Amino acid sequence: MTEHIPPGPFRFGVFLAPFHRCGQNPTLTLEQDLSLMEHLDALGFDEAWIGEHHSGGWETIGSPEVFIASAAARTRHLRFGTGVVSLPYHHPLMLAERMVLLDHLTRGRAMLGVGPGALPSDAHMMGIEVARQRDMMAESLEAVMALLRAEEPVTRKTDWFRLQDARLQLSPYTRPHFEVAVAAMASPSGPRVAGRFGCGLLSTAGTQAAGFDALAGHWSIVEKRASEYGARVDRSTWRIAGPMHLADSREQAVAEVAYGLPDWLEYFEKVATLPLAPGATHPAEMAEAINASGYGVIGTPDDAITQLERLSRQSGGFGCYLLMTHDWAPPGPTRRSYDLFARYVAPGVRGALAAPRASLEWVAENRPTFMGDAEAAMRAAMGGRDR
């Protein structure tokens, strides 16, 4: 019996933190990211989520909204989300106003992804207690959703922001409003907030060991919480992010990531305090550790499809897979990796390759009949038909 694999994902995109090692011209790396958005748009990717960070030296986009405005002007189809705006860093009225403006400027291609803030160093510079960030996120999101949904002025007062007869000057371009998604790691806090406010889920650590284990129960938490608050949620709004680098063979993929994987792993260990390949000292060992842990894929399109099936099985089905962007390989092979994903992985998972393959097999199986008919027609056209 064939094992049942939940359907999807049916949409694909990228999660652009971004990750660029220090020592490069930051203006050029930003241009590189914008150029990548154009490339992904041409390849038919569906979404791109842009991060917000303020320290660490690698993740250098301080305002995802500004980046999205520039990228949207260069693209036609790609939808853009903030991945994510750290809500404790912003007054909710100002954030809602910026997102509504972006919704208009992109003609409905903007999405709001929110979270409490990932880097403690960012919070430190703003005098924010890390222990309070999740509560502050929930308070802010409640205010943002009220501004987007309420017909009456909104008044809210917390110990860190105040809204007094607040209303949006512009209604959203997208009706009733643009999509909103909440970041989720391994804990249930993100799913609880998403369910409470009827938002989507953005699992940024769904391929890490703890995050993968939690996937099985995350959407049930969203649904339970939504039921308690009378909200509506849809599994198709669930995104899961993870890294991949694809080549024509596993050996080639491993060789290519020797370019940047060691630096990337060092950054994650020192800044994000997340050792992903402990004990590995050689690039090939690091690549093997990434593959063995299930965190990412360094291999072929078939390996990528296997990973997506694994995530679908564990999660029970989700709507969109986001490739975490990185500089594991040089620019040329990195773009080739996206090409391979768009050419073989995305249509394979969506089922778009089944009909052409069936047609090819049908024609090949019936070739003698078709060729006989063609030869008979040719003889008739040349006047050589037997009477």
Image (cartoon, rainbow, N blue to C red):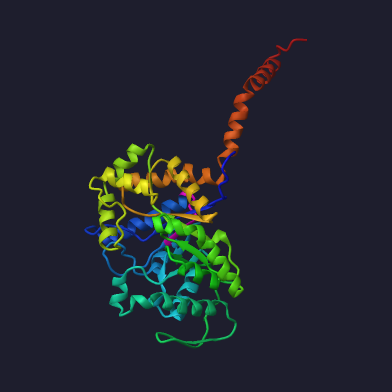
Q: Horizontal and vertical percent for residue 176?
A: 59, 72
The residue lying at 32 percent from left, 68 percent from top is 119
Q: Identify whether 94 is placed above or below 325.
A: below
For this orientation, the residue located farthest to the right is: 387
What segment carries the magenta color?
Answer: 43-49
For this orientation, the residue located farthest to the bottom is: 164
Q: Horizontal and vertical percent for residue 72?
A: 45, 62
The residue lying at 28 percent from left, 54 percent from top is 265
Q: Identify whether 321 is placed above or below 106.
A: above
The mark total stands at 0
For this orientation, the residue located farthest to the top is: 387
Q: Horizontal and vertical percent for residue 98?
A: 45, 74
Asked whether, in this view, residue 369 is left or right of residue 167, the answer is right
Looking at this view, is 126 or 33 the one in front? 126
Judge whether residue 173 can be spotted in this image: no
Q: Horizontal and vertical percent for residue 36?
A: 38, 54
Q: Is residue 353 magenta?
A: no
The residue lying at 37 percent from left, 49 percent from top is 293
Looking at this view, is 54 or 109 the one in front? 54
The residue lying at 50 percent from left, 64 percent from top is 201
Can you say which quadrant of the picture contains the N terminus? Answer: top right
Judge whether residue 190 can be spotted in this image: yes
Can you say which quadrant of the picture contains the C terminus? Answer: top right
